[in-house]
């Protein structure tokens, strides 16, 4: 189950797009659980990035897993964590990369979900695996560039 909170004025379709992408990522990885998503503007995600990651700039997506470590344990209550997405950043990146807003928002939701499931992209090997999974999930959803 996914709960989507909109702290900014955004089309209602954003909630549906994000929920669909998260569900696709969970199914693809054979997982289930609850994820909370908050859709924000660049100012809000900038503050979160500065406060929690010591990075003084806005970003597109931030994930906060409920548990971290080498392997993500089964969460007794099913809560996997939180994802925060900047809707204005998603719109700008969609335009910059020449694809749809739906594709970019789905990509960010899948990316955040994979982080909650323990995937990362700090090394070349990790990045290849994670970005490959992202593309596989988006293809399964029928979303291309």
Image (cartoon, helix red, strand yellow):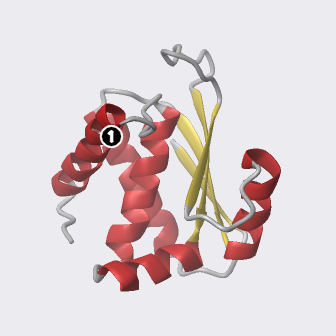
Q: Is 142 located above or below residue 67 in the figure?
A: below
Badge 1: residue crowd in 10 Å (few <14, some 14–19, many ≥20): some
Q: x, y (%) of residue 73?
A: 53, 14
Q: Residue at the location (32% across, 69% down)?
A: 103
The secondary element bearing badge 1 is classed as helix
Q: In which quarter of the image is residue 8?
A: bottom right
Residue at the (56%, 58%) spot, across then down: 61
Quarter that holds the C terminus = bottom left
Q: Which residue lies furthest to the front in this view?
A: 124
- Asked if residue 56 lies left or right of residue 104, the reply is right
In the picture provided, is 131 more to the left or to the right than 111?
A: left
The residue positioned 51% from the left and 65% from the top of the image is: 15
Tell me if 127 is positioned left or right of 87 in this view: left
Please determine whether, in this image, residue 97 is positioned above or below residue 22: below
The percent coordinates of residue 75 (x first, y second) are: 58, 18
| Residue at 53%, 81% in the rendered image | 11
* Numbered marks: total: 1
Q: In this view, does 56 lie above or below 69?
A: below
Residue to which mark 1 is pinned: 130
- Quarter of image, res 82: top right
Question: Residue 142 placed where, x, y %?
Answer: 17, 62
Residue 106 position in % (x across, y down): 38, 62
């Amino acid at each position: 189950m996914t709960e989507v909170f909109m702290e900014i004025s955004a089309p209602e379709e954003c909630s549906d797009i994000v929920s669909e992408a998260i569900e696709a990522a969970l199914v693809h990885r054979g997982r289930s659980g609850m994820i909370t998503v908050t859709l924000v503007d660049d100012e809000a995600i900038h503050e979160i990035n500065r406060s929690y990651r010591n990075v003084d700039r806005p970003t597109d997506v931030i994930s906060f897993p409920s548990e971290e470590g080498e392997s993500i344990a089964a969460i007794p209550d099913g809560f996997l964590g939180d994802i925060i997405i900047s809707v204005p950043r998603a719109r700008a990146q969609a335009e910059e990369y020449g694809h749809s807003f739906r594709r970019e928002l789905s990509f960010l939701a899948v990316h955040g979900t994979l982080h909650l499931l323990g995937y990362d992209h700090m090394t070349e090997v990790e990045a290849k695996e994670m970005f490959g999974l992202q593309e596989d999930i988006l293809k399964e959803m029928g979303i291309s560039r």
